[in-house]
Amino acid sequence: MVPLVRNAAQLCLIFFLFTSLLTSCGSDEEIPSAAPAPSFAPPSQQALTVEGFVVKPQTIERTLQATGSLLANESVPIQFERNGRLEKLYFQEATFVKAGQLLAEIDDSELQAQKKKFEVNLDLAEKQAARGKELVAIQAMSQEEYDRLLNSIESIKADLALNAVQLEKSKIYAPFSGVLGLRQVSEGAYIGPSDVIVDLYQINPIKLEFDVPERYLPEMKSGLELTFTVVGQNTPYQAKVYAIGTELNPDTRTVKVRALANNAQQILKPGQFAKVNLVTSVTNQAVMIPTDAIVPILDGKQVFIARKGSAEAITVLTGDRRNAYIEVLNGIQIGDTVIVSGLMSVVNGSKIVINRFVQP
């Protein structure tokens, strides 16, 4: 019991001394007040440092990229119109031939024999008719018999004319100047009208055929110039549109367009794949700004322009893209200054300071 009382007395003494010490300190010095918190201006009053771009008029070409194929300007399979044994070929494969040049002929010995027979018969009929004319004059032959002799002459002449046509069909000539393909038959083969001997191509000029999407139809017109390249060659070739299809493909919603290209060196070949670049229109006063200036928003795109030290948000529509620049179709005028940096912090009405202008 005694130790507990002693401990309690000691604790009371310690508490009394500590309280007295605090009181004496408070009487000598005044406890300093807390330092005031630093003040910051609202963000809306802070000028943001940004970069600007002054809009200048630019000329841009609107182009269409498409793929197509090269076609011969003219092409035809060389075939005989009648049956017969192929007698002779007068050409070398893959060579140039002129219009009217003899290419091949089939055996015409039977037709030649028929021709000789008809000529003999005609000579005989003409002599009989001459004699009949004399007999009619002396009334030794009726007019009816004489008319039959004359009809016989006309019949033989008709046979000769038909024979001449058949003989002409025994030879085949190039219908136009061009380059031959590879022959598909050999001399001595028995052929008919369905057998192709060789194909003939006119490849200068050469045709280019490609498909154009429906939305570009209003801009398609005869005379438009274009460039194209073919596989394995980096050199662009020039061509000019000469025909536009009249019917859309219902599956692809495209229309076929054809152009002509010079091929004097005959480097281009029918069937080659081509990449087409067609200028559909030219805009001389286009508004082009850096793509970094475009800010996506919920219902479209917007751009901030600098007006009297503040940022003004403008909702815009965009057009064609050219590398790091994009066309703006509305809301921005030539001479406006577009903000191109710090856009994460800029809002409509923000105070701004332009420290640098970006050059196009």
Image: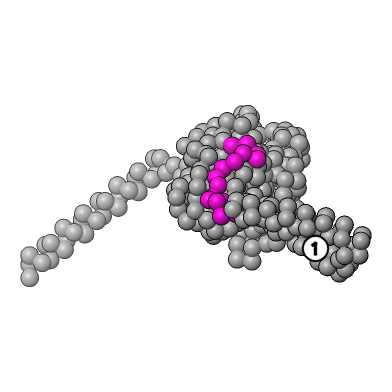
Question: What residue do we see at 20% from left, 56% from top?
Answer: 13
Counting every numbered tag in the picture gives 1
Q: Closest to the observer: 23 or 267?
A: 267
Q: Does residue 48 show up?
A: no
Above or below, comparing residue 111 to residue 36 in the picture: below
Is residue 142 positioned above or below 18 on the image? below
| Residue under the point 50% across and 47% down | 87
Of residue 312 and residue 235, the one placed in the foreground of this image is: 235
Query: Which quadrant would the C terminus be assigned to in this image?
Result: top right
Taking depth in this image into account, of 232 and 110 the one nearest to the observer is 110
Residue stretch in magenta: 97-111
Residue 320 part of the magenta segment = no
Instruction: Report whether residue 4 is seen.
Output: yes
- The image quadrant that residue 134 belongs to is bottom right
Q: Which residue is mark 1?
A: 149
> Which amino acid lies under the numbered mark 1 shown in the image of this protein?
Leu
Q: x and y percent of residue 317 in the render?
A: 69, 51
- Residue 83 versus residue 236 in the image, above or below: below
